[in-house]
Structure formats: C-alpha cells, structure tokens
Image (cartoon, rainbow, N blue to C red):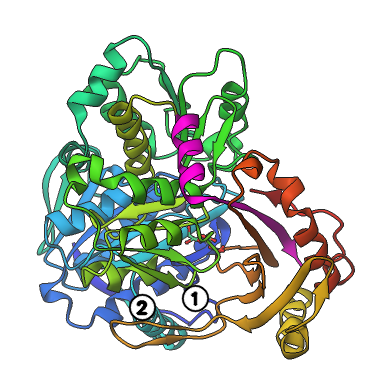
Amino acid sequence: MHTIEIQTQAFSDQKPGTSGLRKKVKTFQLEHYLENFIQAIFNTLGDCSNQTLALGGDGRYFNREAIQIILKMAAANGIPRIIVGQGGILSTPAASVLIRKCKLDGGIILSASHNPGGPEDDFGVKFNIANGGPAPEKFTEQIFSHASVIKAYKIMDSDDIDIDTIGEYALQDMIVEVVDSVADYADLMEQLFDFDRIKALFESGMFTMAFDAMHAVTGPYAKEILERRLGAEPDTVMNGVPLVDFGGHHPDPNLAHAKQLVEKMNSASAPDLGAASDGDGDRNMILGPGIFITPSDSLAVIAANAHLLPGYASGLSGVARSMPTSMAVDKVAERLGIECYETPTGWKFFGNLLDAGRITMCGEESFGTGSDHAREKDGLWAVLFWLNLVAAKQKSVETIMHEHWQLYGRNYYCRYDYEAVDKTAAEQLVQDLRDQSAQLAGASYGDYRIMTCDDFRYSDPIDNSVSEHQGIRILFSNGARIILRLSGTGTVGATLRIYFERYESDSERLDRDADEILQPLIEIAKQITQLEKKLDRDQPSVIT
Ligand code: G1P
Ligand code: ZN
C-alpha cells in the first residue's frame, strides 16, 4: 500500500452550481474526472493533516465506487480521520448533523439531490464546511480555480475498505470510522420534537400517515423514526427501500413526481397526513387529504407555531426565505416582531444568518425547510414538525392551514419550469428582460401595474459579500410578483423557472383555485418575455 501521484489534465467544466458539482454519471466516470474535482477540494483545504471529514451520499448509482476513490485520495492527501455512513449512506441533513455533532472540519456529500439516478443519469459532489452547511461561494470558486489548472492528484494504491460493517479501519495513516447512518440524526429529532405526544397520536388509532421515500435515501431514516421510534403502522413508509436508480423515477417530492402519494391523498381512503422526501433527504412535501401545502405556506405555518414544540419553545430569533419563495412567512415575522431576511436561491445563503443567530428557521419554495439544528434543509425534520403540530393542536392539516390563512391572508403561489431548453435562447431571454427593466416600470396590464423590475442583488449582512444577478423581479403595485431565473442545478441545456405570487386577504377569497387566481400573472409573463416563441415551448415541463 503506497501513495501514488497521477498526472492529469484539467476539465474546463468543474464549476460548482447552486448545490455542488452535478453532471451525468458518464461524465463522472471519465478517466480522472471525479479525482480531479476531489483533489481540487483537498487543494482548497490546503494543509489536510488537521482536517477530519464526513463522507457519505444518497446511495445513487456510482455512490459506492466514488466513496472508495475518495477514501484512497483522502488517505493519500494526509487526512487523519474520516467518518463514513454505513454502506456509504448519509442523507444530506444527516451529514450536516454528523459534521456538527462530531465537530468535524467538513464533509463530502455525494448526491444529485432530486435529479434522477442510474448509469444514464446524474451524480453530484458537494463540499460542506465545519458548520455543517454547503461551502460558501468564495470556497467553491477556489475549488473551481484549482480544478481548472490541476496537473496531478494523489491516491493510495490499496484495496477497498469494508464500508458495510460498523467499526474503525486503517488506510495507511488515516482512520476510517464507519458509523450507523441513522442513529445520530434520529436522536437529534427526538430532542427537537415531542415524540411521546406523536406516539400517542399514532396509538390513538385515529390517525394514519403515508410517507413516500421515493426509493431514495430517507427510507431507512423514516422507518427508524416513524415506524420504530414513533410506532406508526409498518406500512407507513412507502417505497422505503433505497435503489440506485430510484426505481427509474425522479426522486423529487412534488405534485408531478410523487404521483403515487398524491393519488393516495386524493382518494377516499386517504391517510391524515401525506409526506415525501427527495433523493438525498433534504426536501419535503406535505399533504393532507385533498390538500397540498405549498412549501412557502409550510414555512409560514412552521414559523407561526414553532413555540408549541419543545425544540423551539423559547421562540424564534428571526426567519429567512429565498427571494422567489412566497412572502407568507414575512407576515408571520411581522406579527411576531422578528426579522425576516430575503436571500438568493440556494441553502448556502442561510448559513451565515444561522451561524450568527439571526434566524432560527428558513425555507425555500423548492420544497426546502429547516432550522438551526443543521445547516442543510431537512425533509424529515419538516415532516416531524407537521406531525408534532397535528398532535399538539389536535387539528387536521387542512384546518391548520385554513386557520393560518384566516389570520394572515393567503399568498397564492405557483412555479413554472421550462426544462432542458436551449441555453443561449434562455440566457438571451433573461438578458432581454434585464435590458427592458427600466421601461417596464409603470406599465399596466389590465388591473396589474408594474411598480419596479430589477435584478436581485444580495448583500450578506454578516460578511458583506455581494451576490449579483440572482433573478429578475417584476413587482406589481398590488403586491403581486413574477420572478424569473435560470436554474443552477440542471445538467441538460438550461431550465427557466418562473414564480408567480399574489396575496389575498379577503376572507371570502381564501379558498379559490390557485391556477385561476394566478392566470392573469401567467399571461403577463408570457406577454412580456415572449417565452413561448423565444424558447419554442407552449407548455412548461413541470408546474409546482
Ligand atoms: C434548486 C432550487 C433551490 C434549491 C436547489 C438545491 O436550484 O430552486 O431552491 O436550493 O435546487 O436543492 P435551481 O435549480 O433553481 O438553481
Ligand atoms: Zn435534495
């Protein structure tokens, strides 16, 4: 067993996006591709001799092979200790929790989140820092710089490590500690939520739930927490066995991809709570019988009721939402008299606010919700929150949502995604809008008058770093908004996302169909952008 140095050439496309480097599996399998990127991470860390790391992934195709390569490279780069989830499995929130609990210096998470998996689909690598959260932009930019000029990488010439058996192994001078992937995470959930109360709810025989793990990483976590620790019926977890290709589906918990669950929740025999999580366990979807809770509303309900739950009984220091997320939580913050921050899309922007204690909770419209217990969004955490809420209030999901709207008003909301469109055309469309923004201010479309149109720019209140071009905002005088931005996680062409929002406080108008309420805004967006012509699409690929 010895260290070897392999000569390599840089790839020009190793720039991390919204959430790490995501590419087709076939790209990661190119000779030296994964190795170059991992070496670029180690080069960014600098002296690795005092860096202890976590390592694990969502179990998708190529996870196990990548883990072995990374372990051998970590040893060759002088990392003294690395903690690996058993079988190479760690959900993204569990990895964040592990880094924090064990006071590690960071972690490498292998995941392409909600993107499909399998030999023809996606893989991803992400680096998280010591606070348990995604590396900030200045760090990922350094990774990219190193990856762009890399000439060699270091790796051990050694046998594979047994990652399936819990225990400690030596790889040259490095200790590999294989740990239970679920236990630490489940223990933390037990501290945050009132497990006795939730258990009593399940034992009452008056309450059932369905959790769709979508054949992804949360299966074992949900079985342990919901079925074993909380006593839910054994068939509560659907699609609970993780598969390397997620059974051929998109592991994305939304109305389009979690079809089986949605049908169940719309059927006569619907359980009282329906929930799902994504490929790596950081997203969540919440449903009641016949009702879908938008992630933006979910964040608002969670913030408004946090004080009822043990982990948050002392109240919230503040909240934050990504810019395209609906402004429902702003109303809650106003009433609570706490700060509400608006950040660019991507969880990494919440890190500084959480670390500085400025916020306790945060969320994104893209099915992400979380709190200061981790530095990643956390799917099961949100599900447990709703479960605890139903148990504490003894009210249905629907009633909780309706009572919230009565008190705060309702932010009707939806998102259109135009996936895999021509990249140049999509970039041009956004640029055209940018060029038009000054003229758009003051323009009227029926009852809607544009107040301002700008390109969102964020100045981080903690480190003063500035992030430009974070999405075009068209803001109307009645408070409605249309937001447009290009996705930073896609792997084919470009994806244009358009977000529509309209606030309604008239108690007679809280139960309308969101499509109907938002239709005028959708038409305005089409008219202003000419997107159907420019992108050659007459329908969005997905509506959420
Ligand atoms: C998408 C979501 C964003 C989320 C990210 C990672 O990024 O929109 O909110 O943080 O996935 O889960 P996008 O593809 O829009 O850049
Ligand atoms: Zn995810």
Tell me the CA gap for discs 2 and 1: 10 Å
Three-letter amino acid code of the residue under disc 2 = Ala
The residue identified by callout 2 is 40
- Asked if marks 2 and 1 touch (Cβ < 8 Å), the reply is yes
Apparent side of residue 378 relative to residue 342 in the rendered image (left or right): left
Q: Residue at x 64, y 41 (%)?
A: 508
On whether residue 404 falls in the magenta region, the answer is yes
Q: Residue 146 location in percent, x, y?
A: 38, 85
Relative to 541, residue 341 above or below:
below
Q: Residues within 10 Å of mark 2 (few under 14, many from 20)?
A: many
Which callout, 2 or 1, points at the residue further toward the start of the chain?
1
Q: Residue at x 56, y 28 (%)?
A: 261
Q: Which residues are magenta?
A: 397-421
The residue identified by callout 1 is 14
Apparent side of residue 402 relative to residue 3 in the rendered image (left or right): right
Give 142 or 92, whichever is nearer the viewer: 92
